[in-house]
Image (tube, grey):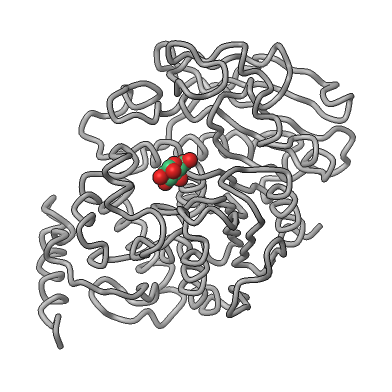
Amino acid sequence: MKHAWFPLMLSLFSLFAGRGGAAYPEAKDLPSKPGLPDPLVMLDGSKVSTKEQWAEKRRPELKALFQHYMYGTLPPVMKFQVKSLHKDEKAFGGKATLEEVGLDFGFPDHLLRVLIVSPNGRKEPVGCFVGPNFCGNHAIVDDPKVAVPTSWIYPNYPGVKNNKATEEGRGKQADVWNLEQTIDRGYAVATFYAGDIDPDRADARGGIRPHLPKDLDTTSIACWAWGVHRIVDHLVARPGIDPKKIVCVGHSRMGKTALLATAFDDRIAIGIPHQAGCGGTAPSRGTVGESVKQINDRFPHWFNAEFKKFSADPTRLPFDQNDLVAICAPRPVLFSNAQEDTWANPNGQFEVLKAADSVYRFLGVEGLGASEPPPISKLLSSRLGYFVRPGKHSMNKEDWGAFLDFADKHLGK
Ligand code: GCU
């Protein structure tokens, strides 16, 4: 009975919500709850007992809560024109078609450049991996025609001078994306330089943010996820791509983005947040690796001002990352990690999957289907999948092998 006042307070808040008042309690007024929350319990404490309640009440409530207290609001859907910038129908020795398309939202001096590589000679439309990259499309393939980003870029990426990418970085990330392996397995890949959407700096503006309403409470991660969604708009209408087989992938901060993008867009069939850690796949209530305070202090632009209020006590968060996975249900989600990457708390991530499992089973599908993590390098390919390989924080060929096996299984190959 410790928090008997809480539901009453909430109903008062909801009364005001309809009139433009604050819809949710202040962080300091939320009760401290140490364990991972049950996704099937509403904010007011009532239990979800039907699939309709889940779909119509709890799932939308969770989406609103994540935006209010953590990621900020995803920018609104926007229309764009597609321009083909460069096309090579004989890429990878003739195995694939490589095209760069520009999504033009009509903002001055702005273009979202998407690199799309698809296998040639397939009778049926193919599945497609989509996700942001760190260093530019030109870094992923060794093709002199793929444009070097003109947007702001980190100084410590290969070939960067004065925060601009240069020719020197061309092809330097080829073994991060391993495109040829994916092509050979019959999938397309669509990727974009994250900086075309948001520069990933608290003190730099660029990408789409200057073109959004000034009072929009948004963040880098919400904007990147929005970028993924706009590319999905293009992919679902693109000949040769199977709109039912879109897999969202991302590494680290882009893994956080991949999970958010998957949760907020049902057109994405599978989510693969790789080594996403705190603010993504690791529990905010976790005690291993990066903490909410550390991530808020170092990367204030990833999350909104509300989230900072939980730095001192994340147990007051009215959700944890298992709730973000639950929003994805019943779609398959794979958490993949590296053994030495304890900063991302791989073991805590397994607990997150365990605590999302009830929603999958409530919806009548398989969830995690395991009580212990699988051995190293062995893929647990349940609908809630898990994979840890030896080594450090990176994305490599072995990781992609697991992503492809997971996609094959769940997309019926
Ligand atoms: C830092 C940060 C992580 C993040 C990672 C990355 O290590 O602490 O939260 O995932 O950068 O994006 O590479």
The number of discs equals: 0
Q: Is residue 395 left or right of residue 81?
A: right
> Which of the 4 quarters of the picture holds residue 375?
bottom right
Give the quarter of the figure containing the N terminus.
bottom left
Residue 107 locus on image (x, y percent)? 40, 17
**Could you tell me which residue is drawn at 75 percent across and 61 percent down?**
409
* Frontmost residue, 43 versus 181: 181
Q: Residue at x 56, y 12 (%)?
A: 166
Q: Is residue 73 left or right of residue 309?
A: right
- Quadrant for residue 86, please give it: top right
Judge from the rendering whether residue 395 lies leftward or rightward of residue 156; answer left or right. right
The residue closer to the viewer here, 306 or 274, is 274
Judge by depth and name the residue closer to the eye, 392 or 199: 392
Among the 4 quarters of the image, the one containing residue 24: bottom left
Residue 15, given in percent of the width and then of the height, sits at 12, 64
Residue 86, compared with residue 95, is above or below; it is above
Quadrant of the frame with the C terminus: bottom right
Coordinates of residue 200 in the picture (x, y in percent)? 39, 31
User: Which quadrant of the picture is home to ligand 1?
Assistant: top left
> Which residue is drawn at the image coordinates 46% and 68% (left, top)?
352
Q: Residue at position x 43%, y 15% from top?
A: 163
Measuring from the top left, give residue 162's x and y in whole percent.
43, 11
